[in-house]
Image (cartoon, rainbow, N blue to C red):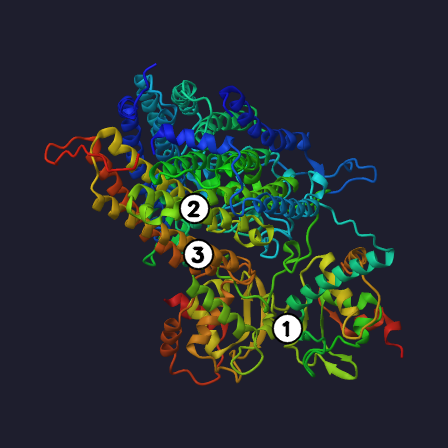
Amino acid sequence: MKKTTEQQIDQSARIAVSFFVASAGLWLLAAAFLAYVAAAKLTDPLFLSSFEFFTYGKVKISQANAFVYGWGGNSIFAVSLWIISRLSQSPVRGTPFLLAAGTIWNLAITFGLLGILDGHMLGHELLEMPKDVWPALLISYLVISFLILVVFRSRKKKSTIAPQWFIVAALIWFPCLMIFAWNGLEINPGRGTLTSILSMWFGQNIIWLWLTPVALGCAYYIIPSVLNRPIDKYYLAIFGFWCIAALAPWSVVHHLEGGPVPMWVPAVGTVMSIAMVFPIAVASTNFHSTAFQDISKVWNYLPLRFVIFGTLSYTISSYIGVIFSIPAVAKLTQFSIINEFHFNQRVYGFFSMIIFGIVYHILPQITGREIGSAAKNFHFWTSAFGVFGLLLAYLIGGLTHGVLAQQPSLGWVTVIDSVKPYFLITEFAFVILGFSQLVFVLNVWKVLVPNPFSTIDSTVESKAV
Amino acid sequence: MNNIFKFSGYIFLTLAFAWLAFVVGAKNQYGDLSQTSESLEENGSIIKDADLYPQSMAGIAQLGAKEYLSLGCVTCHTQQVRSEESGFDVERGWGKRPSVPRDYILQEEVLIGHNRVGPDLANVGLRDYSNEWLHKHLFMPQMEVEGSICQPSPFLYKVSGEPSEKTIEAISADNKMIYIEPSIQASRIVAYLQSLEQNYELPEVSFIESDIEADELVETAGTQTIDKESSSLPSWLSDQINSGKEIYMKAAPGGGLCFTCHQPNGLGIAGQFPPLADSDWVLGDKERLIKISIYGLMGEIEVNGVKYNNVMVPPGIPPGSLTDNQIADVLTYIRNDWGNSASSVSAEEVATVRESIKGRAPMQMWTAAELNKKSDSE
Amino acid sequence: MSDENLVDEHVRLSEVKHEPTKGFLQAPLIFVFVFGCLIFICSIQLAHTTNDFQLHPPIEVVDLSPEEIEAQRIDKKLKSGEKVFKARCASCHQANGLGITGQYPPLAGSKWATTDSGLITNIILKGLKGEIIVKGEKYGTSAAINMAAVPIGDREIANVVTYVRKSWGNESSEVFEEDVATYRSSSADQLEQWTGEQLMSLYPESFTD
């Protein structure tokens, strides 16, 4: 059988991956806009307040959904398609179906968001879109992931490595989660706070078992691929993977600490969350001890720079998350804007940065066109500043919020008054982030859409073979 | 790891075990969790003829829950009182006891939330907010609570310049009087908020002793100042009222000694000192009131249909020594406590009246006839 | 590295046993130790915070003796009574129960408060006017300063009277809600405030020295 070359695989994947990357970019901009509106509404409550369409709650929730499903979903499709087909050395098949399913996915999210803004949102975390769009989401997802898994199944070498485990697992986890949630929240809902438990479980698992593994898989792929050395202490990777698989679904419910649920639910969650230290340490060791052996190459090759930024964010935010799951700390921070810190660190600082890196790595190879390094550099620095500012504001603001809220003598307005400066900082940070995301989309646009006025450079940035 | 079916199976199992525990296991544990009486008999059965809790909300409140959800309020508000070792919620006065799963079994939309940009709402129905206050808060939170970042929802109301029986008086951002008419959605939301309370005990949890016992709160004459946050008054007004209350209750120089006759509860003494609560003299013409405060009153006077005949020295220690500001404050106070609710009195108004009666001899107390004649002729 | 090499290299790493590099031998021990510690800490956490995997939060079952239960009940009543006193009575009678000489009679050590509970209860129910002598001093001489009836419910009256009768050195008996109800109905004919003489004639034993 003729060995399929990397170029042939890139060629087969080109259309589908370009489509998904383009959709992802557009959703990123939509989410950035909504994030800015939400942050602005916190500093100036009268901003857009006369429109029922744009209440703070609706905007915030549609931002989260646009980000996770629109940007997250499409970018997951893009990178998993490419990485799986490259590692399987088997071409992408069924591109028309991929495109059709991708379009339905995007349309479903659009209608879902319009439904939220029109006042039909549901009360489940990250599943607020009206349930009329759920079948469309699920079916289009199943089509896309089926086609990716077909490619995986037809791989030349039967043995698998870490990137494949994480990505395939993520692809399988999503529909399982969705079906469990659909059953427990809409078809056969439990009474009272049973729905709250399931809704929290689903919402957090989307982050931990869908976005996170794909990003980890990307890191496991690109670091050895570019640095031309295998992952350091690779024998730990399998333990790390199965620990995340086994512990993460249990650990996410620790957010329910002290709530109107059976005590053992958040207690088990806390315990498992503390145990998560182990797989986080494994992933961190794998990535960083490999990367720091060749730090100059990491710095100079921009996609890798993005990825290592992401992996460092992952390590730091996960450890901080473990600390915040301890009940003594959660007493203060449980309902404060530390939650925002956690969510944004995960999706902006970790997931997005890794996706940016891998997309910048993929695009030149599938399009044959290079993106100027100045543009990428600019994107990197604005992103880094934006993310850093955002997270610092939420972290310090959240701690202030939690500590002050604890004092019964302080009225609530006094508590919020002290947090308002941090809201202002997040507003600025979202402006910078929005700008950096615009730069990303322009960069992507430049290579996806051939511009007769720019020089077409078909040499790909060198990487050692 | 290499066989996709086995791999998928294991992946599914990792989720399934967690699902079994948290969803199926918890559901079984909830079992047929249902209403129960506040405590149980010796043998564990429900007490006969006792009230059962939790109680389901009125229909309009349930519709309000859906409106609450559709507006996205759950993004900023939680509805759960955490247990004492897990949080400070009871200490903050957000509930008399921690919330338990049973509290939510009759709710169609369980919106316990996970973020507190705004205060917890599990017991907002207990916090003595009037419907009017809640409507005004929904319309423009900054009107009631200065510095609030709660989002206004003006689209839920119709603003008009004319009062009617459906409208609520409010003060706009530029200090003008406006009248807002709540829409159906707004009424539903307010009904929902008023129904949010966990004011009952259950066999598994009882009230926690705290300094704030809502059912023991009595009218506090003299000890409690009006809390700015929960008051339905703008801050300048509540400042005036607080200051006036101090003057009313004070029996030392700078005070008015008013309470000694009219009593801290504003009810006076039957046959001797007329009441101020619900009194037409207090709620009515301001000029009469101001004049009495400057010169005092003697002789027969009819208050709420009851005749009194006594001597009132002008308030102050020494008598008649209250300044314009103090008179304005104490009159604003008596017009706004004990169920009274009338417009405030400003120092300028007092000064004007004082100027107009400049020629009157010192300590020449008014008679009721004089005061009524004067106001009739205007 | 090409993808093919990537896969080959990592598969080889996971399958082939290579000789221990520096620190490799320690790694499993360290991980076992760390894992063991984690399990230990987590088990303790679980044991303490799950209430035996019950649905309901732990109910504090405190074995109290009857005396302790009684003491808690009285304590709660006194706290409640203190609140009522501070809100309704302290502005005249002062928080320390000593009143103001010549104006407001003291309650500490006063026969009017500490003897028959009907005395003080009736005063709260209907008010008091005219001159009385409390601890050797005259009070109520000025018509301006009399006591009006306090419009609170029976339970509050029982609580505040109990508080007065058990504070500031007073050691008198408790008053219950039913007693107050009885006094209320038996004084239904009294439309005005009580006078001192009326009460002294109703409760002569209180004033015999």
Q: How dense is the environment of label 3, judged by Cα within 10 Å: few (below 14), some, or many (20 and up)?
A: many
Q: Is residue A122 visible?
A: no
Viewer-side label of 2, 1: 2
Tell me which chain the residue with mark 3 is part of.
A
Indicate the amino acid at tag 2.
Answer: His
Indicate the amino acid at tag 3.
Answer: Gly
Residue behind mark 3? A397
Left or right of A451 in this view: B286: right
Given residues C36 and C138, the one toward you in this image is C36
- Residue A131 screen position, x and y as percent: 44, 26
Disc 1 is placed on an element classified as helix
Q: Quadrant of residue A201?
A: top right
B14 is higher (above) or lower (below) than C111:
above
Residue behind mark 1? C91
Q: Quadrant of residue C199?
A: bottom right
Numbered mark located on residue A288 in the image: 2
